[in-house]
Amino acid sequence: MSKRNPPDPASGAAIVRQVRARGIHDPRVLNALARLSRARFLPPEVRGQAQADRAVAIGLQQTMSQPFMVAVMTAELALAGTERVLEIGTGSGYQTAVLSDLAAEVFTIERHTTLSLRARGLLDGLGRTNIRFRVGDGTLGWPEEAPFDRILVTAGAPTFPTTLFEQLAEGGLLVAPLGPEEGQELTVVRKQNGKPVSRTVLSCRFVKLIGAEGWDKD
Ligand code: SAH
């Protein structure tokens, strides 16, 4: 657990119980979840749904991912604490907070200004100092800061995200939901000798990744 980031006084104990019951045992991931209040990242009108193990609407037709999915994606990133991580889809900032606890630096991109500003306000308020925020099309990555050791895409991509893969360091991991709008496969891609080596983890359903290398705007 990072000393840099002060613990959130509200506890994530209920979330930890749920994801553990569903087979997540990675102690670093469970610790990071335990230190966060999911409710804090939800708009007041839906805060009552914070303990439910499902995605919750956060406005602008976007959702905060299901805790189990946050846990699985984070575990698949296999973070040791030294990594520079690029996250596409800041959304509520909950996943960003988890990453900021387990990695050295987090670069997070969101296409909706309102969501990005809300997340930034929350994470600044929690004293998280190792996160950089950007508003824009995350499918194009963050070339000035590349390469990244890990890349996490938290919206469903219709095709393999080539530009993001180019911004991945050799030996690095990219985790993304890939496939049609109705349902995707959570996919882990390793860059090995410059080439992608992929495996799928589970079926999932995320909101659309919208951008130059994603879906067209609705
Ligand atoms: N990790 C977030 C998930 C939010 S849902 C959370 O748990 O709260 C996915 C997010 O991706 C949405 O906020 C959506 O606006 C954003 N998004 C979709 N396409 C994007 C793109 N091309 N670049 C950046 N963000 C994008």
Image: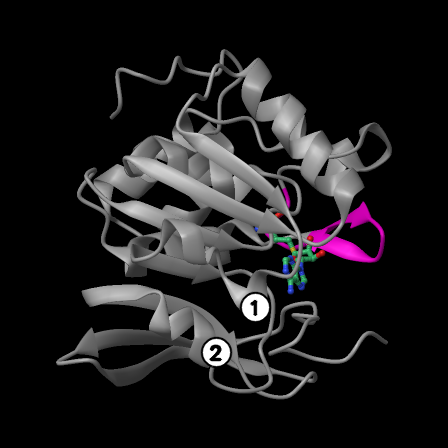
Label 2 SS: loop
Residue at 42 percent across and 24 percent down: it is: 35
Of residues 158 and 24, the one nearer the viewer is 158
Residue 69 to residue 6: above or below: below
Left or right, residue 47 beside residue 97: right
Residue at 45 percent across and 21 percent down: it is: 128
The three-letter code of the residue at mark 1 reads Thr
Quadrant of the displayed image that contains ligand 1: bottom right
Contact check, label 1 and label 2, Cβ < 8 Å: yes
Residue at 75 percent across and 32 percent down: it is: 47
The three-letter code of the residue at mark 2 reads Pro
Left or right, residue 192 beside residue 168: left
Q: Earlier in the sequence, mark 1 or mark 2?
A: 1
Spot occupied by residue 201 in the image (x, y as percentages of width and height): 36, 76
Q: Does residue 22 appear in the picture of this structure?
A: no
Give the magenta-colored segment's residue range: 52-63
Q: Which residue is mark 1?
A: 139
Most extreme residue toward the front, as rendered?
144
The quarter of the rendered structure image containing the C terminus is: bottom right
Residue 1 to residue 215: above or below: above
Label 1 SS: helix
Of residues 181 and 33, the one nearer the viewer is 181
Quadrant assignment, res 196: bottom left
Residue at 72 percent across and 31 percent down: it is: 118
For the residue with label 1, is its CB less than 8 Å from the closest atom of ligand 1? yes
Q: Estimate the spatial distance between the alpha carbons at disc 1 and disc 2, rounded to whole Å.
A: 7 Å
Spot occupied by residue 203 in the image (x, y as percentages of width and height): 50, 79
Task: Give the mark count.
Answer: 2
Left or right, residue 166 beside residue 59: left
Q: Which residue is mark 2?
A: 161
The quarter of the rendered structure image containing the N terminus is: top left
For the residue with label 2, is its CB less than 8 Å from the closest atom of ligand 1? no
